[in-house]
Amino acid sequence: MGFSADDGATLLMTFRGLEAENIKQGEIHKALAGDLLELVANPFEQWAQEHRVRGHVIIQLGPQSTSFSLQDKILSSKATMLEGYVRAYEQSQIEVRPYLDLVVRLMDQA
């Protein structure tokens, strides 16, 4: 037959060698995945759950309790800050307006 008589045996040995290497690599990957799960994924999941609890605040107001998230508080403070900027801008326009009117009148007279 075109090859030597032990072709089947050589192929079988090659296959078994590849199989053993793949099993070894699989065990290494499994160990690495376990380490990642133990050292990264599980601690992160625990942190995320604790963060979710920290992000929700409950305020007791007499017999009622009000609950809001920190995101709501942040959005509220941003709105307050923007309102302050708008108010300052409007105030500066009120202070500048008389001078602008004066300049326009002087230019009209010229």
Image (tube, helix red, strand yellow):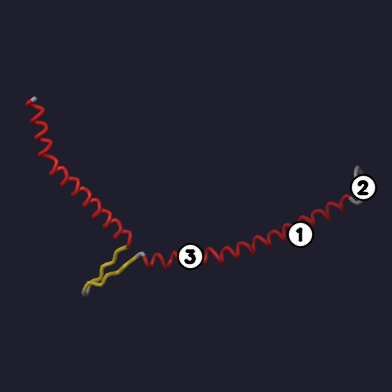
**What residue lies at 81% left-to-right and 53% top-to-bottom?**
14
Q: Is residue 104 above or below residue 28?
A: above
Residue designated by label 1: 20
Cα–Cα gap, marks 2 and 3:
59 Å
- Local SS, label 2: loop
The answer to whether the residues at label 1 and label 2 have Cβ atoms under 8 Å apart is no
**What residue lies at 33% left-to-right and 59% top-to-bottom?**
71
Q: Quadrant of the C terminus?
A: top left
Q: Residues within 10 Å of mark 1 (few under 14, many from 20)?
A: few
Q: Earlier in the sequence, mark 1 or mark 2?
A: 2
**What residue lies at 43% left-to-right and 66% top-to-bottom?**
49
Q: Quadrant of the N terminus?
A: top right
Q: Nearer the viewer, mark 1 or mark 2?
A: 1
Give the label on residue 77, or none: none
Q: Residue 63, image x and y in percent?
A: 22, 74
Residue designated by label 3: 45
Cα–Cα gap, marks 1 and 3:
35 Å
Give the label on residue 4, or none: 2
Q: Residue 36, image x and y in percent?
A: 58, 63
Q: What amino acid type is highlighted by mark number 3?
A: Glu
Quadrant for residue 9, please give it. Answer: bottom right
For residue 12, side relative to residue 46 (left or right): right
For residue 48, side relative to residue 65 (left or right): right
Q: Earlier in the sequence, mark 1 or mark 3?
A: 1
Q: Nearer the viewer, mark 1 or mark 3?
A: 3
